Image (spheres, grey):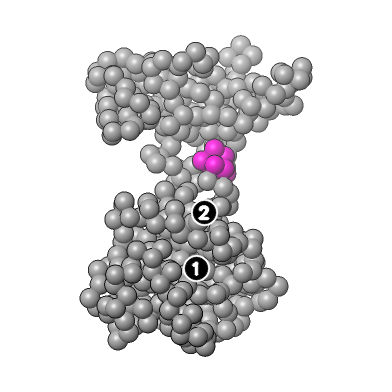
């Protein structure tokens, strides 16, 4: 295995009689030896194009790609020692499943016995041992996808690329296999990059996640960093299920305490949230902002002794999903969704208190959409300063 480096990689597609399309723009990424990276983003953002450039299936318009210290962007796909599981499976119809999986091993002159042993091992991992004698046309979509995945994972490659590796699997099988696959990748120290539209899959499998939009890398970070410290409004709104509540507002001085005044759709005051001490050093008074509130960080009803700002609103929906409650609350003309890990007894049209914990709050600049403040970070820094008898620098 080896590290993987993409240095300012750009991909431009040129079609006859059409203007050029820049699918990937100035993309840089360093993947450590044995690290698992997830690529996520909306459809058409350049995820698969990036994967295909690493594999050698698409040419690089600008930039370089290296595996370890070896540049590979000028090499043919067969010369790169990169394994890829395709979203479209790309199996060989005339070959049995066992031969599809073993194809690259036998082509590399691995002894038949050793190749068969490795095929059986990876087939057991992906629960496809019973279909090894069958041919691809006789398989379901989910079975074909697992065969494609097995054919990639069975190889001794420097880098492994997985394009939507489990999109066709039933939820229960997907949950089981992604845990097995992650253990397998870690155990064998396999440098891996995978594309997925499933945030749960990305969070479960990846050491770090790269979020893309319109061909541009928006943020690279751990699952926790992306949720707690999104770098901009796109990442904040894309990462998280359900998505972050996003409202408009403006900071205002309230007798020495900086607060953010949340507005309804007509720009009228809906409610105000006091900001943690230290926020003044990051967000000026009178600043127009997008106000982000993470649903899972909001506290519906009792705050269990926590001293957090509270506002009151009217329950407009209450959905118990078996392990979580989704509560829609209207506050001053703004609809806010909160998620609780227990059953919430709040009927529609009744009043309920909503605790606005600092870690639920994020502020973004209206014009640049860049993050200005993450309430949890500021609150933690303020608490640390108080414990040490000092003030947070402004």
Horizontal side of residue 371 vs 70, given as left or right: left
Q: Quadrant of residue 88?
A: bottom left
Q: Where does the C terminus fall, quadrant-wise? A: top right
Residue at screen point 52% across, 46% down: 223
**Under tag 2, what secondary structure?**
loop
- Estimate how packed mark 2 is, as few (under 14), some (14 to 19) or many (20 or more) residues with alpha carbons within 10 Å: many
Calculate the distance from the C-alpha at mark 1 to the C-alpha at mark 2: 13 Å
Question: 12 or 106, which lies in front?
Answer: 106
Query: What residue is rendered at 42% in x and 74% in y?
Result: 119
Residue 161, disc: 1
- The residue that disc 2 covers is 206
Residue depicted at 34% across the width and 63% down the height: 127
Q: Which residues are magenta?
A: 224-231
- Could you tell me which quadrant the N terminus lies in? bottom right
What percent of the width, then of the height, locates residue 369?
53, 42
Is residue 143 rendered to the left or right of residue 252? Answer: left
Is residue 230 on the magenta stretch? Answer: yes
Q: Name the foreground residue: 103 vs 284.
A: 103
- Give SS at disc 1: strand
């Amino acid at each position: 295995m080896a590290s993987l480096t993409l240095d300012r990689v750009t991909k431009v597609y040129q079609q006859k009689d059409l203007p050029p399309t820049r699918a990937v723009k100035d993309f840089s990424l360093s993947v450590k030896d044995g690290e698992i990276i997830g690529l996520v983003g909306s459809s058409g953002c350049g995820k698969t194009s990036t994967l295909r450039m690493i594999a050698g299936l698409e040419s690089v318009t600008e930039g370089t790609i290296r595996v370890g210290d070896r540049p590979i962007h000028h090499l043919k796909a067969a010369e790169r020692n990169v394994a890829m599981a395709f979203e479209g499976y790309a199996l060989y119809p005339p070959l049995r499943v066992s031969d599809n999986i073993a194809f690259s091993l036998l082509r590399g002159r691995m002894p038949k016995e050793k190749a068969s042993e490795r095929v059986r091992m990876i087939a057991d991992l992906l629960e496809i041992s019973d279909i090894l004698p069958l041919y691809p046309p006789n398989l379901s979509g989910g079975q074909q996808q697992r065969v494609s995945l097995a054919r990639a994972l069975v190889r001794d490659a420097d880098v492994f690329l997985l394009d939507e590796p489990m999109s066709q699997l039933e939820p229960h099988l997907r949950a089981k296999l992604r845990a097995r696959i992650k253990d397998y990748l870690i155990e064998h120290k396999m440098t891996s990059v995978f594309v997925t539209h499933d945030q749960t899959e990305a969070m479960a499998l990846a050491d770090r996640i790269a979020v893309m939009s319109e061909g541009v890398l928006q943020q690279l970070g751990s699952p926790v960093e992306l949720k707690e410290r999104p770098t901009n409004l796109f990442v904040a709104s894309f990462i998280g299920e359900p998505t972050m509540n996003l409202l408009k507002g403006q900071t205002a001085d309230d007798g020495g305490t900086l607060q953010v005044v949340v507005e309804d759709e007509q720009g009228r005051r809906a409610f105000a949230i006091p900001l943690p001490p230290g926020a003044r050093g990051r967000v000026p008074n009178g600043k127009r902002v997008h106000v982000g509130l993470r649903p899972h960080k909001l506290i519906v009803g009792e705050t269990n002794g926590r001293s957090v700002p509270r506002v009151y609103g009217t329950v407009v929906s209450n959905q118990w999903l078996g392990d979580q409650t989704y509560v829609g609350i209207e506050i001053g003309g703004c609809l806010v969704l909160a998620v609780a890990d227990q059953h919430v007894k709040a009927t529609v049209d009744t009043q309920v208190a909503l605790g606005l914990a600092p870690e639920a709050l994020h502020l973004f600049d209206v014009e640049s959409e860049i993050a200005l403040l993450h309430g949890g970070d500021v609150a933690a820094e303020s608490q640390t300063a108080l414990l040490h008898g000092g003030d947070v620098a402004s």
